[in-house]
């Protein structure tokens, strides 16, 4: 290969790589980490206190027949740290970093390229519905099944530390109480 051909190839490669970074295209290697990092200078630092025993027991769920049970990582057949995301993040409607930061500070050129109106989000998802769907489908429960999960509950305690003095400023108990929306079953049957 000649030197001019190599230069053209490298120029095209770097132009494509920089275009991916400028337009925040997620599939480009080595560009995703800086796109989704963010620093927010708050007075308090919030930290989730993880209760490993509570997480091991799993969600407290209510079935359609009114009975209660626990559904954990073992029942859902997922690794412990994937269940951690379900228990401490998705149950509290906290999206993945990609979804949360993908909507942050898109400049007008990025909005125009993606066809987004001002204020319109790049990523949207109904986390409550996704959690119910994945739990019920994994366990093999149909919407008319008496064991169908209609309520999911999770708990944790959030600790807030003062940034300057690094002392505990306050504790807040957090409770997720998600309930099944019957319209989701109707929407799913119309899309099939």
Image (cartoon, rainbow, N blue to C red):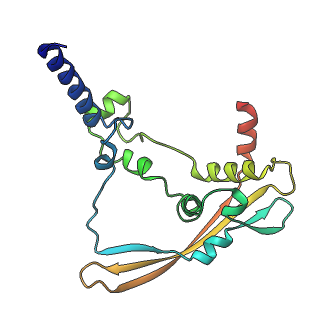
- Residue 168 location, x and y as percent? 37, 85
Q: Residue at x 48, y 79 (%)?
A: 172
Q: Residue at x 73, y 50 (%)?
A: 138
Q: From what the image shows, is residue 166 above or below residue 178?
A: below
Left-right relation of 28 to 132: left
Q: From what the image shows, is residue 52 above or below residue 80?
A: below
- Residue 72 location, x and y as percent? 68, 65
- Residue 122 location, x and y as percent? 42, 39
Q: Residue at x 56, y 64 (%)?
A: 84
Q: Toward the viewer: 77 or 133?
A: 77
Left-right relation of 67 to 75: right
Q: Toward the viewer: 76 or 4?
A: 4
Q: Residue at x 74, y 32 (%)?
A: 190
Q: Residue furthest front?
A: 1
Q: Toward the viewer: 2 or 154?
A: 2
Q: Residue furthest left?
A: 3
- Residue 112 location, x and y as percent? 31, 29
């Amino acid at each position: 290969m000649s030197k001019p051909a190599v230069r053209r190839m490298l120029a095209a490669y770097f132009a494509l790589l920089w275009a991916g970074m400028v337009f925040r295209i997620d599939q480009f290697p080595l560009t995703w980490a800086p796109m989704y990092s963010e620093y927010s200078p708050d007075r308090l630092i919030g930290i989730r206190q993880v209760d490993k025993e509570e997480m091991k027991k799993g969600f407290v769920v209510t079935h359609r027949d009114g009975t209660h049970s626990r559904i954990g990582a073992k029942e859902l057949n997922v690794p412990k740290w994937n269940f951690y995301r379900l228990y401490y993040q998705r149950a509290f409607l906290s999206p993945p970093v990609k979804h949360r930061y993908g909507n942050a500070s898109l400049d007008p050129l990025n909005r125009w390229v993606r066809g987004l109106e001002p204020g319109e989000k790049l990523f949207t998802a109904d986390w409550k519905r996704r959690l119910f769907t994945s739990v019920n489908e994994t366990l093999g429960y149909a919407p008319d099944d008496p064991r169908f999960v209609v309520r999911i509950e999770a708990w944790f305690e959030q600790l807030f530390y003062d940034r300057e003095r690094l002392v505990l400023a306050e504790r807040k108990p957090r409770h997720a109480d998600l309930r099944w929306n019957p319209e989701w079953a109707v929407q799913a049957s119309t899309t099939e």
